Image (tube, grey):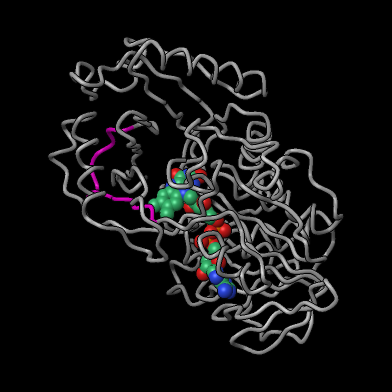
Amino acid sequence: MKLWRDFSGLRVLREGLTGHRGWQPMWRDPAPKAAYDVIVIGGGGHGLSTAYYLAREHGITNVAVLERGWLGGGNVGRNTTIVRANYALPGNSEFYSHSLKLWETLESELNYNVMHSQRGLINLFHSDGQRDAFVRRGNAMINQGDDAVLLDRDGVRAHLPYLDFDNHRFPVYGGLLHPRGGTARHDAVAWGYARAADRHGVDLIQNCEVTGIDVAGGRVTGVQTTRGAIEAGKVAIVVAGRSGQVAAMAGMRLPIESHVLQAFVTEGLKPIVHHVVSFGMGHFYISQSDKGGLVFGGDLDFYASYASRGNLPMAEHVMDAAMSLMPAIGRAKVLRSWGGIMDMTPDGSPIIDRTGIEGLYVDCGWCYGGFKAVPGSGFSLAHLVATDRHHAPAARFRLDRFRTGAGLMDEEGTGVQHNLH
Ligand SMILES: Cc1cc2nc3c(=O)[nH]c(=O)nc-3n(C[C@H](O)[C@H](O)[C@H](O)COP(=O)(O)OP(=O)(O)OC[C@H]3O[C@@H](n4cnc5c(N)ncnc54)[C@H](O)[C@@H]3O)c2cc1C
């Protein structure tokens, strides 16, 4: 049994005493082969988990993940790491519930410390109407088999004493606690899946941009890349914010707009924020990393863009919301900010489906929320690619709902506008 030796305490001790010269790269660096059974375009969280579950669950190992940059350089390494299963609508509810269950056994399954921390997530409410909405959401979560606890004002104060409870615009009335919600170390998730997929024989090919998708007689036959043409029986497009561009290579127009989402981190502080806190009225959310940085973010920048960085007006808006909720944060220094490209659908819910081209699949539309979906999405897409049948928890994530209007899942109730979800 090789796995236990890789990161055992004894191994770490031995390497520490011998100059760390014994560590090996965690995955191979293979040249692309001429042909694969399955090509996954995109080496983010979803692409890597898809490749892993194809191998692990379905025994399909002649698989390549093609990544234009480096593994984990996209949104999977840029997000604010919140993992939760607190959706209300049928479709989303069962999918995220399944994904959270996969998170709960992920570290032992991958033998990799992804620092999954179920520290609890609290969604604050600020009016009687909002309380009613959160009671409904909490009941939906419990009906799905997940956990939810309604907190009154004093209940929130016991957990989050540092909030401004009497803010004139948005006094805190209470909150919905989701105890199994929390965070995970984002890039460790990419690395853990990458290592596990590689060990099943999957080729992880970095610096390999897909520039074209080959179709003949209504069937996908392979891809063109910056490292040459590669044939494939099946191809899955799993490129998050670039979904529209890559689908266009096969002549498809997806119902996706790409928008920038920013995030921020402060200098390291002593532990103060022990949960994930979400302030819906100001659209601000915060947690504290294990290194001590306060990690927070808010709204999209509100214009369509492929730039992985945002602009100052939204930075100001987020700081403003932070100060309204938690005035003490004004003493912390922001160290860094960054952005990622979000694949926004008109109803705010994702797509895992076949396309009109045989053998070509899409997995996209994760909006703000695709990090927590990494295990569930990979599991469900792998099932679809391997069997050509939808995996039950993701069965409603159909592409044609945007054509027919049937089965839309507008979790936020904001209507058909990509940037409002
Ligand atoms: C600031 C921010 C905060 C967020 N916070 C959260 C959160 O707290 N919780 C949560 O659940 N979600 C969150 N998200 C959303 C989440 O990160 C994404 O929905 C999810 O990571 C997207 O899936 P992915 O990991 O596969 O994407 P990515 O990591 O972006 O992977 C897609 C990959 O495809 C590659 N690619 C693109 N085009 C090509 C091509 N032509 N050829 C080859 N490769 C290509 C890209 O280089 C990229 O590596 C946040 C996102 C951001 C930006």
Residue that lies at the very extreme toward the left in this rendered image? 331
Measuring from the top left, give residue 176's x and y in whole percent.
45, 20
Residue that lies at the very extreme toward the bottom in this rendered image? 228
Q: Is residue 114 visible?
A: yes
State the residue at coordinates (25%, 17%): 171
Q: Nearer the viewer, residue 383 or 312?
A: 312
Q: Is residue 271 shown in magenta?
A: yes
Residue 312 picture quarter: bottom left
Of the 4 image quadrants, the one containing the N terminus is bottom right
Specify whether 251 is left or right of 58.
left
Measuring from the top left, give residue 47's x and y in whole percent.
63, 62
Q: Is residue 189 shown in magenta?
A: no
User: Magenta segment range?
Assistant: 260-273
Number of marks in the image? 0
Q: Main secondary structure of the magenta part?
A: strand
Identify whether 87 is placed above or below 9: above
Specify whether 12 is left or right of 375.
left
Measuring from the top left, give residue 397's x and y in whole percent.
69, 44
State the residue at coordinates (59%, 16%): 139
State the residue at coordinates (60%, 70%): 246
Identify whether 120 is placed above or below 105: above
Specify whether 305 is left or right of 71.
left
Residue 335 picture quarter: bottom left
Measuring from the top left, give residue 241's x and y in whole percent.
50, 60
Q: Is residue 184 visible?
A: no
State the residue at coordinates (21%, 22%): 164
